[in-house]
Amino acid sequence: MIKLLAVVCCFVFTFIINGKHDFVNFTLKNGLRVICIKKSAIPIVTIHICYDCGSRCDAIGKSGVAHFLEHMAFHSHGMAFNNFLEEIGAERNAYTSLGYICFYEVVPKEYMEKVLEYESARMRSLDINQEVFASEKKAILEERNMVYDANPAGLIHESLYANIFNRMSGGISVIGWKHEIESIQQQDLFDFHDKWFAPNNAVLILVGDIDPQRIKILVEKHFGDLKAKSLPKIKTRCNVAPSVVKTVGCKSSEANCFRTCYVYRIPFFARDNFRKYLSLSLAVQAMNQSEFFIIKKIKSATNMLNEVNFSFTSNAAYDIVTIHLTGVSQDDMDSMEELWHFLKEKLRTNSGLTDSEINAVKRQRSTFIAHEDDDIKLIAYSIASLLISGYSPEEIMAQDETIQAITQQECNNLITEIFSGDPIAISKLKRKDYEEK
Ligand SMILES: [Zn+2]
């Protein structure tokens, strides 16, 4: 009885029901944020835990440590967690981005507590076997080769970030620069874990056939005694003077095409304003439709462009948020640049997104959200990335209503605002057989 009272006192507790999900949202005294969503159609549960420490937290000269830690955390503690998950036929995976490291499992509901126990052990400590460490290093070097070195699209993005952030080391490349991965020692992983794996640096999302009241007790039982840590501050990484356009060129032995990528700074932090973030994501989605006038114009004018797309950094992992336009061309490097001078003036004055283009994208979003409603893994995944980017559970749960209220004018204003500046970087990737004149 005493224990139960102690448990209840530990929460800052809100229970919110909206049209879409029934969810419980609470924070333990040690800072661990928890969201549980009840979906009882099937007796399974997904457990998704994210740490707010992606490759942006890699020290200078130690790129790839966050990602390496993600790999090793699977094999920690004598593989006990891994073996258990295999035995019960669970689905599980992990991922690392600039912003965060996440782990998730999908299990029959009766195993949820055991998984919470293992996740709590993973948060407490890391236990590394030398043999596994060596073989994972090999696997990661191979992964680097696949994702960047042998993949022109990956390579141009890696070089772009190095360009924007003005250095070739630490935190810019998620998997890590080859020579730095090779130099990673076990101690680097322990240090990273010690610094960043803490309840006050994590969010835990549970979705499925669960009893929210029982969850509070279980989470407190397994995570409640962990101590909050004082988290290091990351120094600014952005060395870009906004007026300086830097062009980098790289060449890939795998590239059959030329690629040109223009990067613009988004002059607001998306995490400060969820509606603005959603407006931007709608605008970018609409600009990528083949009917958008820029895409049509680029394709018709150059004829040889086989791919054009807009993208933006979707979380505020760095000090700056950027929007990218990438053009891929079989035969030519300069036509994209000539055309771009003309098109950016257009974007500056009137991006020309029409009402029907924005409405079409809104409908696509609603359909996606409705589809997502059945998929507990996808629900947890989308909530995790937004939550760790700093948005509140209430904002996240109400996102469809916010999306539907966004106007075409808001989207157009954003595009004009972004393209009224100059690009902060241009990256070019040459075709493998290209000879400099
Ligand atoms: Zn990996």
Image: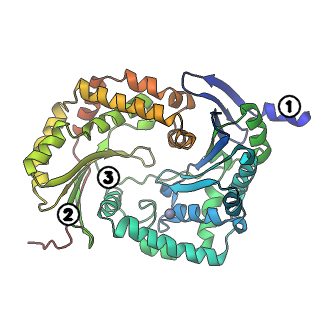
In which quadrant of the rendered image does the C terminus lie? bottom left
Residue at the disc numbered 3: 240
Residue at the disc numbered 2: 257
- In this view, the residue in front, 211 or 276, is 211
Residue drawn at (27%, 23%) of the image: 409
Badge 3 or badge 2: first in the primary sequence = 3
Local SS, label 3? loop
Q: Residue 51 shows which numbered tag?
A: none
- Mark 3 vs mark 1, CA separation in Å: 53 Å
Q: Position of residue 50 (x, y in %)?
A: 58, 48
Q: Position of residue 146 (x, y in %)?
A: 39, 68
Local SS, label 1? helix
Local SS, label 2? loop
Badge 3 or badge 1: first in the primary sequence = 1
Q: Is residue 54 above or below residue 213?
A: below
Residue at the disc numbered 1: 5
